[in-house]
Image (cartoon, rainbow, N blue to C red):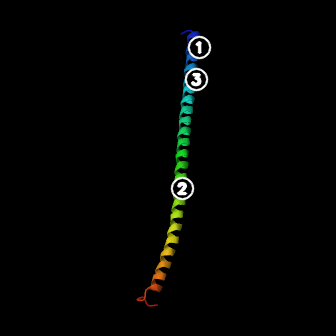
């Protein structure tokens, strides 16, 4: 074979290798961008879930406080009923 054929083969091989490297880099970039998008979506979902949980916790605290107040009122009413009832002994 002539020298020019070897040169053409070498240049073609370098071009093919270069194209493969660039393609691999592009594919990696697409995968990374896809993962970043997925991470953003997961963070958004986590934030929404955390806010919902915080709201529910605040509601639960409020209900617990109302229950404590109502329990106190019920106990006071029971004590008053015991004071009024002539059949209850001290």
Q: Nearer the viewer, residue 49 or 8?
A: 49
Q: Residue furthest left?
A: 87
Q: Which residue is mark 1?
A: 7
For disc 1, the neighbor class at 10 Å (few under 14, some 14 to 19, many from 20) is: few
Task: Answer above or below: position of 62 versus 50.
Answer: below
Residue placed most toward the observer, 50 or 30: 50
CA gap, disc 3 to disc 2? Answer: 55 Å
Q: Earlier in the sequence, mark 1 or mark 2?
A: 1
Residue 85, horizontal then vertical, whole percent = 43, 86
Q: Earlier in the sequence, mark 3 or mark 2?
A: 3
Who's the residue at 47% across and 86% down the image?
83
**Residue name at image x 58 percent, y 16 percent:** 11
| Residue that badge 3 annotates | 18
Question: Gap between marks 1 and 2, in whole Å?
Answer: 72 Å
Which type of secondary structure does the marked residue at label 1 adopt? helix
Q: Secondary structure at mark 3?
A: helix
Q: Crowding near pointer 2: few (<14 within 10 Å), some, many (20+)?
A: few
Above or below, 2 relative to 67: above
- Category of crowding for the residue at label 3, using alpha-carbon neighbours closer than 10 angstroms: few (below 14), some (14–19), many (at least 20): few
- Which residue is pictured at 57% across the width and 27% down the height? 21
The residue nearer to you, when weighing 16 against 31, is 31
Tell me the SS state at disc 2.
helix
Q: How many marks?
A: 3
Assess whether mark 2 and mark 3 are in contact (beta carbons under 8 angstroms): no
Q: Residue tagged by mark 2?
A: 55
Of the two numbered discs 1 and 2 in the rendering, the one whose residue sits closer to the viewer: 2
Image location of residue 88, percent across then percent down: 42, 88
Q: Position of residue 27 (x, y in %)?
A: 53, 30
Between label 3 and label 2, give the one nearer the viewer: 2
The reply to whether callout 1 and callout 2 are in contact (CB within 8 Å) is no
The disc, 1 or 3, on the residue closer to the chain's N-terminal end is 1
């Amino acid at each position: 074979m002539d020298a020019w054929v070897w040169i053409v083969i070498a240049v073609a091989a370098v071009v093919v290798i270069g194209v493969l490297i660039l393609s691999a880099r592009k594919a990696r970039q697409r995968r990374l961008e896809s993962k970043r998008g997925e991470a953003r979506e997961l963070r958004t979902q986590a934030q929404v879930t955390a806010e919902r949980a915080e709201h529910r916790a605040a509601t639960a605290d409020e209900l617990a406080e109302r229950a404590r107040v109502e329990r106190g009122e019920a106990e006071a009413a029971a004590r008053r009923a015991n004071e009024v009832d002539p059949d209850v002994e001290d």
